[in-house]
Amino acid sequence: MASKSRAEIQAWKQQLVHQAEVKLQSLTTSANFKAYLKTMAKFHRYSLRNINLIYAQDPQATQVAGFKQWQKDFNRQVTKGAKAIRIAAPITKRLTPEQQRQLETKRDQAIVGYRYLPVFDVRHTTGEQLPQTRDFIKTELGEHANVTPLYQAFKTYLNKTTGLTVTERPMTENQARGYFAPKTNEIVIDSQESDQGMRLKTLYHEYAHSQL
């Protein structure tokens, strides 16, 4: 197969952004969306190393947590006999002033090794149902009254649980309604945009750009 041209690659990227935007705009009920985000935020964000470890041991794993965390945070029990997935957890030690000078660091602690802790995939647990995306997805954006709290909830979620920063600033007439700045990992939304639906659409659009 011939290699794709730059224009074809750009069109493909735009299609990915459009598809992500369409999917994200189908979120409607803000209460359910907030509940979903609150639950998902309890799951630890694993490093690439641990993601690789999880996949190597169980390619079907989607949501993993420790034995006690399933009980405490999700009101679920690990099934008896379930096989654990091992992830690497750093072992740290406090540095003395002399060690800080030797290592040329101002950090109080340093990683001295790793231990491998057991976690379990959601399909090996039973109990209270976890909220699913389908619980709050509909074919099109619903009542306009839902838009403002949904926009605020999504913005707060991105600021608190991801490496992204979402801010609002006034933009000139010839600027877009928002943009993503890769160098600062920041999404900026036009604070002068009065249509909350458009703000939400722009935030979803720029979030999709950030993930690409």
Image (cartoon, rainbow, N blue to C red):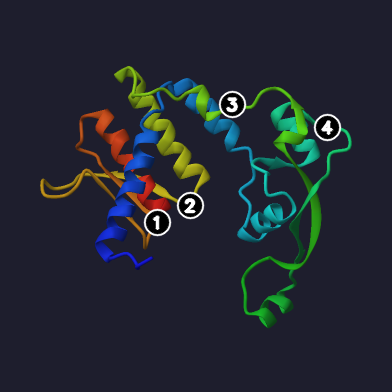
Q: Residue 166 at what x, y percent from top left?
A: 37, 45
Q: Residue beneath label 2, please? A: 163
Question: Counting residues from the N terminus, which is met first, the one under dot 2 or under dot 4?
Answer: 4
Categorize mark 2 by other alpha carbons within 10 Å: few (<14), some (14-19), many (20+).
Answer: few
Q: Which of marks 3 and 2 is in front?
A: 3
Kind of residue at badge 2: Gly
| Residue shown at the point (45%, 44%) measured from the top left | 159
Q: Is residue 78 above or below residue 118?
A: above
Question: Counting residues from the N terminus, which is met first, the one under dot 4 or under dot 3?
Answer: 4
Q: Residue beneath label 4, please? A: 79
Residue in the foreground of this view, choosing between 33 and 108: 33
Q: Gap in Å between the C-alphas at discs 3 and 2? A: 24 Å
Q: Gap in Å between the C-alphas at discs 4 and 3? A: 20 Å
What label sits on residue 131 in the rendered view? 3
Q: Residue beneath label 1, please? A: 185
| Residue shown at the point (10%, 46%) measured from the top left | 173
- Asked if the residues shown at circle 2 and circle 4 are in contact, with their CB atoms under 8 angstroms apart, the answer is no
- Asked if the residues shown at circle 1 and circle 2 are in contact, with their CB atoms under 8 angstroms apart, the answer is yes
Kind of residue at badge 3: Pro
204 to the left or right of 94: left
Per the image, label 1 sits on a secondary structure element best described as loop
Q: Gap in Å between the C-alphas at discs 2 and 4? A: 34 Å
Per the image, label 4 sits on a secondary structure element best described as loop
Q: Gap in Å between the C-alphas at discs 1 and 2? A: 7 Å
Kind of residue at badge 1: Asn
Per the image, label 2 sits on a secondary structure element best described as loop
Toward which corner of the image does residue 120 lie, by quadrant?
top right
Q: Residue 190 at what x, y percent from top left?
A: 23, 42
Q: Residue 8 at what x, y percent from top left?
A: 28, 59
- Most extreme residue toward the front, as rendered? 1
Kind of residue at badge 4: Thr
Question: Counting residues from the N terminus, which is met first, the one under dot 1 or under dot 2?
Answer: 2
